[in-house]
Structure formats: structure tokens, C-alpha cells
Amino acid sequence: MNDKNKNIIIVIACISTALICIVLTFWGNWKNDGVLTTDAFMAVMATFIGICATLIVGVQIVSFIELKEVRAQMKTIREERHLLNEQKESFKIEMYNARLGLGNALALIALTAQKNNDILIEFESLVISIIIDDWDSMNGTALLNRYQRLSEIADKIISLGKQDYINDTYKKLSILVVPTNINHYNEIMTLHHGLLSKLKSSNQTTAK
């Protein structure tokens, strides 16, 4: 119930009570030969004032109870928001650790594939490790090494003729944004754009 509705109810109750008191006063005195004494009128008004005061106090008590409920709800909301923020931060840490672990695992897979001369698995593992890694906290040297290796074997990958895979790889790498504050930024970006250029040229050559 909002404040406007409460005020309307109070006004209606007070007016109704006043009218009832006035009617009872005149009716009671009419029965007593129609004499309206000052004492009778004052008694009725005192009763009226008491009733109004009771109504106002009752409304204030209800408002106080509702206010306590609102404060309790606000406290619950703050606690839930705090808990949600903690869960959000915990999730960020877990995601970072997961991405870091998966990136390192893919880098190891790429290293194993390199030793086994499986350049397709090596290339794909390096590409995925770059895409999923957390670049904001990633070591620039590790990212530079991955790009250097990708550039070295890009021509061999293109020669395999797997154009759908090449196009998909181009789309994934082209939307990445390397943080400008990362170590070896200029070298990484040179290799990044060079690799994209090779992949794009391969697509254009196949189209012809």
C-alpha cells in the first residue's frame, strides 16, 4: 500500500468517524428533549480525537513494520549482491586458470605434433591455444613463439589444400585483438598480419 492510498484511507476514516459522532450526539440529545449541552459536545469531540489518534498511531505502526520489512529485504539484496560479486570473481579466476591450463596443454600437443612431423595437428593446436588464452595476462614471449612457428609452417598447411580449414582459421584469427601493452607487441602484430595475409591469399588463389 503506497502513501497516497494510506492518506486517503485516514481522511475517509476520520471524516466518517466525525460524522458518526455528530449524528450520535444530536440523536442522543434529541432523545433527551433536544437539549445539546457543551459537555456532551466536548465528550463526543474528545472521543473523535481519540479515535483519530488511534487510527494515526495504528497507521504509523503498520508503516514502521513495513519499513522494517523493506530494510530487511534491502539487506538481503545487498548480501545476495555481495555473494554474486564473490561468485563472479571466483568464476573469473576459475576461467583464467582453465584457459591458461588448456592453452599450455595445447602448446604441449603442438610440440609433440612437431616432433612427430604432424604439421596439421601442430598448426591447429597453436591456433586454438592463441584464441583461448588470456592475452591480458599472457606472457608476450610465449605468444610470439607461437606466432613464429605458425608463420614457419603456414605455407605447408596451405599446400595441403584444406581450404575450408584455412578459411575457418582466417576468420578466427582476424577477429582477435592483441593488447597493446603486451611484450613484443610490434613483432607479434607483424607476424599476425603476415599470417592472415598468407591465409587470405590462399583463399583468393583457390577462388581463381
Image: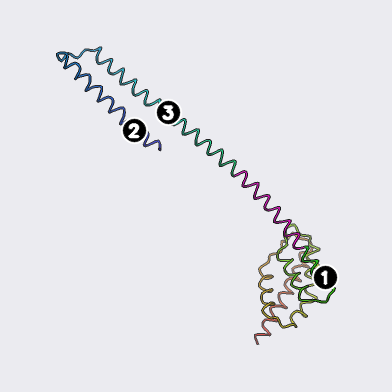
SS for dot 3: helix
| Residue most extreme to the left | 33
User: Which residue type does callout 1 highlight?
Assistant: Thr
The disc label shown at residue 9, or none: 2
- The reply to whether callout 3 and callout 2 are in contact (CB within 8 Å) is no
Count up the numbered dots: 3
SS for dot 1: helix
Gap between marks 1 and 2 measured at Cα = 81 Å
Residue 10, compared with residue 155, is above or below; it is above
Which callout, 1 or 2, points at the residue further toward the start of the chain?
Answer: 2
> Which quadrant of the figure has residue 116?
bottom right
User: Which residue type does callout 3 highlight?
Assistant: Gln
Gap between marks 3 and 2 measured at Cα = 13 Å
Task: Give how far across and how far down residue 127 sits, in percent.
Answer: 73, 70
- Could you tell whether 4 is left or right of 154 in the image? left
Q: Majority secondary structure of the magenta segment?
A: helix
Magenta stretch: includes residue 92: yes
> Which quadrant of the figure has residue 50?
top left
Q: Which residue is mark 3?
A: 60
| Residue most extreme to the bottom | 208
User: Which residue type does callout 2 highlight?
Assistant: Ile
Name the residue located 43 percent from the left edge and 30 percent from the top edge.
62
Which callout, 3 or 2, points at the residue further toward the start of the chain?
Answer: 2
Magenta stretch: includes residue 86: yes
Q: Which residue is mark 1?
A: 112
The foreground one among 194 and 23 is 23
Give, as a single range, the part of the protein colored magenta. Answer: 81-103
Badge 3 density bin: few <14, some 14–19, many ≥20, Cα 10 Å: few
- Could you tell whether 47 is left or right of 166 in the image? left
